[in-house]
Image (cartoon, helix red, strand yellow):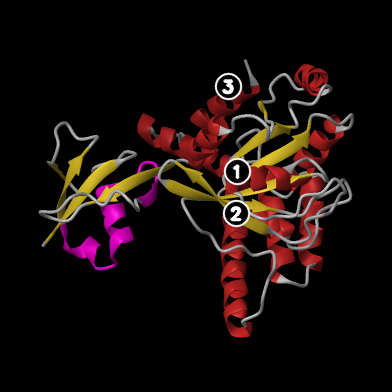
């Protein structure tokens, strides 16, 4: 008989009072309560890395440093019943620190060069070691005048450009490089503010393996990305193998695939067609375009509303005007509906390129 079976048998028998019959359901309730208590009091089993991050949190003097440490604590913490309260506490502290940070910025009106205001259908931050091709890629995709040079650390603060994709624009953010020694102050905040990360390595370089290790170590320790998919606040990312047209690129790519068989890497050259890369970025952003229509007029196809995939008619109403949700009755949909102009309810899930006419009371 297993240890668990012995515990259950002991509990089952011990819950019966002497000389009295105890109902089966009553004993089951007591056993259930016991195991719920065991689960609730399950040890957290926190790792040394967690305690190191916690120590950094306690020593931190700025809200930004505290948030970085809390994000790292949350990302490396084991996820089970025993840590649920701790997870909730960390998330609460993060929310409070974000609010405090925003209030201080409003009061001071100060300039933070690492904070990039979002524009377009999504913000995509490029991340990587020195000279991996970030600036050249942004210059090619956006025609933005960013500094491109063969020497490292050309980019000292974030620079932006707008990448066209079909009928929308996606914001790309060039960032200063990081090394195995760490990242510039404020850079992690730039990454966390983004909707997606483009992680670049240089396939022409003999140290591309070190670049992969450095990139994943830094970004996963800080909770920015997560290959295992266990961190709920991690960002989606795409790993790009830059300079794929270099003579050494194929050999280096084979070595990477052999050492990291599960690694999904997209070879890229700025001298080749980048249409597939643009489409992949749009898909990973996981957004949809919705075209508005007013009664008796044609749909407005020039500037679509951008919503997250899975958004409903009600979500669109919130985006269009703050008063519309309370006045919304239904909507007419062209595109994903069974027939053009079909009347749908508020909870109807919209799809990319739907045309929607809101029916307001």
The circle drawn on residue 161 is: 2
Kindly identify the residue that appears in the image at 48 percent across and 49 percent down: 169
Nearest-to-viewer mark from 2 and 3:
2
Mark 1 Cα-neighbour bin, 10 Å: few <14, some 14–19, many ≥20: some
Residue on which disc 1 sits: 141
Q: Which image quarter is the N terminus in?
A: top right
Find out whether residue 312 is within the magenta segment.
yes
The single residue placed furthest to the bottom in the displayed view is: 107
Of mark 2 and mark 1, the one earlier in the sequence is 1
Q: Where is residue 103 in the image (x, y as percent from the top left)?
A: 57, 78
The circle drawn on residue 346 is: none
Kindly identify the residue that appears in the image at 31 percent across and 40 percent down: 353
Tell me which corner region of the image, top left, top right, bottom left or bottom right, holds residue 249: top right
Give the answer, above or below, for where 78 lies relative to 58.
Answer: above
Q: Position of residue 170 (x, y in %)?
A: 51, 49
- The answer to whether residue 9 shows anywhere in this view is yes
The circle drawn on residue 5 is: 3
Label pair 2/1, CB-CB below 8 angstroms: yes
Q: Which image quarter is the C terminus in?
A: bottom left
What is the magenta range?
305-328
Side of 125 relative to 47 (left or right): left
Mark 2 Cα-neighbour bin, 10 Å: few <14, some 14–19, many ≥20: many
Tell me which corner region of the image, top left, top right, bottom left or bottom right, holds residue 268: top right
């Amino acid at each position: 008989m297993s240890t668990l079976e012995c515990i259950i048998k002991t509990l089952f028998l011990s819950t019966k009072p002497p000389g009295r019959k105890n109902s089966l359901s009553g004993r089951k309730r007591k056993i259930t309560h016991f195991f719920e208590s065991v689960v609730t009091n399950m040890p957290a089993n926190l790792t040394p890395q967690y305690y190191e991050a916690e120590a950094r949190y306690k020593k931190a003097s700025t809200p930004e440093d505290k948030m970085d440490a809390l994000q790292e604590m949350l990302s490396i913490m084991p996820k089970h019943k025993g840590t649920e309260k701790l997870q909730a506490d960390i998330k609460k502290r993060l929310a409070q620190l974000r609010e405090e940070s925003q209030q201080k910025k409003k009061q001071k009106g100060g300039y933070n060069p690492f904070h990039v205001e979002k524009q377009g259908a999504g913000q995509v931050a490029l991340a990587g070691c020195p000279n991996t091709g970030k600036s050249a890629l942004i210059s090619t995709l956006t025609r933005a005048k960013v500094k491109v040079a063969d020497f490292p650390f050309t980019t000292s603060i974030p620079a932006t450009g707008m990448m066209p994709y079909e009928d929308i624009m996606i914001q790309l953010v060039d960032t200063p490089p990081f090394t195995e020694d760490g990242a510039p102050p404020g850079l992690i905040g730039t990454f966390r503010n983004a909707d997606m990360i483009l992680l670049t390595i240089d396939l022409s370089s003999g140290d591309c393996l070190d670049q992969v290790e450095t990139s994943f170590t830094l970004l996963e320790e800080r909770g920015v990305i997560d290959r295992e998919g266990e961190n709920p606040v991690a960002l989606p990312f795409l790993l790009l193998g830059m300079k794929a047209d270099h003579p050494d690129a194929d050999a280096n790519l084979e070595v990477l695939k052999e050492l990291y068989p599960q690694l999904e890497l997209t070879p890229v050259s700025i001298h080749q067609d980048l249409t597939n890369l643009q489409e992949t970025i749009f898909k990973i952003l996981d957004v949809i375009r919705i075209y508005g229509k007013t009664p008796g007029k044609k749909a407005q196809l020039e500037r679509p509303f951008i919503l997250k995939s899975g958004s409903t008619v009600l979500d669109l109403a919130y985006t269009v005007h703050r008063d519309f949700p309370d006045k919304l009755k239904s909507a007419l949909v062209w595109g994903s509906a069974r027939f053009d102009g079909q009347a749908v309810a508020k909870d109807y899930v919209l799809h990319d390129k739907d045309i929607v006419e809101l029916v307001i009371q």
